[in-house]
Each structure stands twice: as C-alpha cells, then as structure tokens.
Image (cartoon, helix red, strand yellow):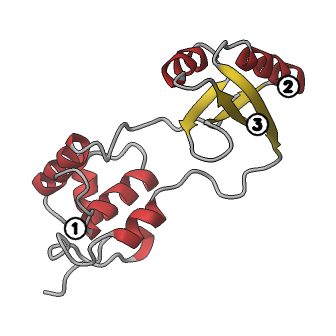
Amino acid sequence: MTAGRTLDALDVALLDAIRNHRRVGDLELSRLTGVARATVTARLERLEAAGVVTGYGPDVDVSAAGFGVQAFVTLEIAQGAIDAVARDLEAIPGVLEAHATTGVGDVLCRVAATSHEALQQTLVDLNRSSSVVRSTSVIALSEIVPWRTLPLLSAGATPSAGRSAMRPAGPRGLPCRRPS
C-alpha cells in the first residue's frame, strides 16, 4: 500500500471488525469478513506498513481513569519556537495532544486534569514555557462526538475493490453462508 492510497471496502471492513471485536485474531477476522486468513494477514501488514494502523490499543477513557476535567488550550508562541514548545508540552503529563494550527493561535492542546485546581496548575505549567506568548483556554463540558475514524474511512473507501470474496454480513455481523 502506498502513502495516500485510498482504502478499499475490505480494508475498512477489517478495521471495523478490529474496532468491534477488540481481541480478535486473524483467524476470527477471516471468519468475520469472509476472506482467507492469508488475505487478512497481508492486508493488516500493508495497513501497518503504510502507517494507517498505528497500534492496537487499549483506548483509554481519561475521565473514567479519574481525569474528568478537560480543556482545549490555544497557544500563541514566539516565532520559530515550535520545536521548543513541543519539548515543553511533552514534559507536562496533563497534555493529551497538541497540534500546530493556522489562525489566531499557533498550537491547539487538549489537556486533562483531576480537578479544576489541577487544571489551573496545568495551565500555569503551559504558560511557564518561555516559548508561549499567550494562552487561551476553554473547558470541555461534554463529549458530543467521540474520536472516530470509520465513518470517514467508509465514505472514502473504494466500494468494491478487494471485496469480491467477502460475503454480506448476517445476524450479529457474521458473514452469511453462500448458498450451495
């Protein structure tokens, strides 16, 4: 699989099966998707090599783990200081992710904390970076759409490529048996 290549329906079906059956192996994926085990193995290896699949979990709900206060923080940083601010952000445990952005701010961070007081300390830590000129934060009240990728991948998948051997799903998501 080359970089930038569109996924096909089988790729998406495999990703969906892995998402819905967390600890499934290649043999069970073969059964779920109705394709040969070797096909499953080869496809997953290509998806991993292309960087599409970057890991197999576990997904962690930070709120359930005790970090129920989350915020989004926009940082304005000194010109050319992206590498320095990246190092500073990586050193702060409460920073879940950070992205360089366009617009008014230069970096958008998602942070989590156990309380509002702990969030305040994380914000203080962010502003201690000599690269941060200004920060603006907004507290997340609730999650409306959780992180997801399958709707996007499904919408962009080549409809029939790689699916010739796949059988349509029956009850409980299992492939239907072909008539004899």
Per the image, label 2 sits on a secondary structure element best described as: loop
Q: Which residue is mark 3?
A: 71
Q: Residues within 10 Å of mark 2 (few under 14, many from 20)?
A: some
Relative vertical location of residue 141 with respect to residue 134 in this rendering, above or below: below
Instruction: Please give left or right for residue 82 compared with residue 14 in the image.
Output: right
Residue at horizontal 59 percent and vertical 15 percent from the top: 88
Q: Between tags 1 and 3, which lies in front? A: 3
Residue 141 placement (x, y as % from top left):
83, 47
Q: Between tags 1 and 2, which lies in front? A: 2
What whole-number distance in Å separates the C-alpha atoms at marks 2 and 3?
11 Å
Relative vertical location of residue 21 with respect to residue 80 in this rendering, above or below: below
What whole-number distance in Å separates the C-alpha atoms at marks 1 and 3?
43 Å
Per the image, label 1 sits on a secondary structure element best described as: loop
Instruction: Please give left or right for residue 148 compared with residue 163 in the image.
Output: right
Q: Between tags 2 and 3, which lies in front? A: 3
| Front residue (pair 158, 104) | 104
> Which amino acid is tagged 2?
Ser
Q: Which residue is mark 2?
A: 115
Q: Can residue 49 be seen from the camera position used here?
A: yes
| Front residue (pair 103, 62) | 103
The earlier-in-sequence mark between 2 and 3 is: 3
Q: Which residue is mark 1?
A: 34
| Front residue (pair 148, 18) | 148
> Which amino acid is tagged 3?
Ala
What whole-number distance in Å separates the C-alpha atoms at marks 1 and 2?
48 Å
The earlier-in-sequence mark between 1 and 2 is: 1
Residue 16: quarter of image:
bottom left
